[in-house]
Amino acid sequence: MNFREKTVIITGASSGIGKSLAFEFASLGANVVLGARNLTALNEISATIGGEKSLAMECDVVNPEDCKMLIEGAVAKFGSVDILICNAGISMRAMFDDTDLSVLHKLMDVNFWGTVNCCKYALPHIQHSRGSIVGVSSVAGLHGLPARTGYSASKYAMTGFLETLRIENLKKGVHVMIAMPGFTASNVRFTALTADGTPQGVSPREEGKMMSSEEVAAIIARGVYKRKRISLMEFQGRATFIIKKFFPRLLDRLFFNHMQKENNSPMN
């Protein structure tokens, strides 16, 4: 794979999958533009990659003006936008019965509207470069995940938006890929919101048994290079995709039983 002189914008780039994506694409020759709220962390990543090949910009994807400035900053420094990776996101863990509605609104603001905001300003440049848009979704965007109503809803919304964007740009050479990793070792579970909107602070799963963020980043890069429509990354994701087609009721039960076994599951 060769992304030399391509410009890649990554949101949520200060940690986890976003940080790994920055290093992955930089190693493949790309210029990387890093967007997140934690500018200190972004500057450290940018310094490691090298200032000539990277740009760190503070960006809250909920704010359309921040997204506009992120895109304009990329064009100002590197002259083009070839790949936009909408990775910024938050999760939750609580039963809908108990959840404050503000939690679901926040999930939609970051995961769905954050994607929409960035795509709005990046799309003309990607149309010009005949480049790629990637939405980092989840297996929860394939099938509803119990105790994650807002998370699943936001990822379903992201999928519907990006699939429609793909069709609208069918004759303009724009590649759109939806990446659907399963459970990945990152900080997303530590910062997942509980019923009242506070971060849960601990992971309910064994992080060491999950895919690493580096593995996910490498798979996403290959998917962009091959211009895939969807990227299912491991057995869990591929099995979910197949079982949903033929045995959706079985999948409901499998998901319920699996999530009920989590440590301190709100389903018990």
Image (cartoon, rainbow, N blue to C red):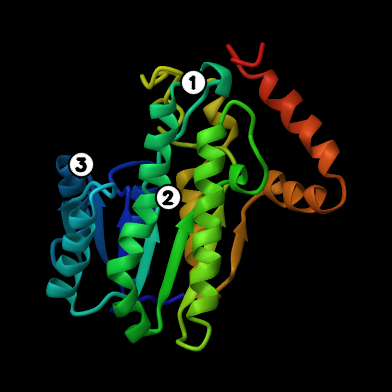
Q: Are marks 1 and 2 in contact (CB under 8 Å)?
A: no
Which one is earlier in the sequence, the residue at label 1 or at label 2? 1
Judged by depth in the image, the label closer to the viewer, 3 or 2, is 2
Around disc 2, counting alpha carbons within 10 Å, would you say few (fewer than 14), some (14 to 19), or many (20 or more)?
Answer: many
- How far from the left and from the top, in percent, is residue 215? 51, 50
* Element carrying mark 3: helix
Residue at label 2? 112
* Element carrying mark 1: loop
Quadrant location, the C terminus: top right
Around disc 1, counting alpha carbons within 10 Å, would you say few (fewer than 14), some (14 to 19), or many (20 or more)?
Answer: many
Q: CA distance from mark 1 to mark 2?
A: 19 Å
Left or right of 176, for residue 115: left
**In the rendered view, would you say 160 is above or below 45?**
below
Q: CA distance from mark 3 to mark 1?
A: 31 Å
**In the rendered view, would you say 220 is above or below 144?**
below
Amino acid identity at mark 1: Thr
Amino acid identity at mark 3: Ala
- How far from the left and from the top, in percent, is residue 109? 36, 43
The residue located at (87%, 51%) in the rendering is 246
Amino acid identity at mark 2: Phe
Q: CA distance from mark 3 to mark 2?
A: 24 Å
Label annotation for residue 99: 1
Left or right of 262, for residue 111: left
Quarter where residue 106 is shown: top left
Label annotation for residue 62: none
The residue located at (18%, 46%) in the rendering is 44
The residue located at (34%, 51%) in the rendering is 114
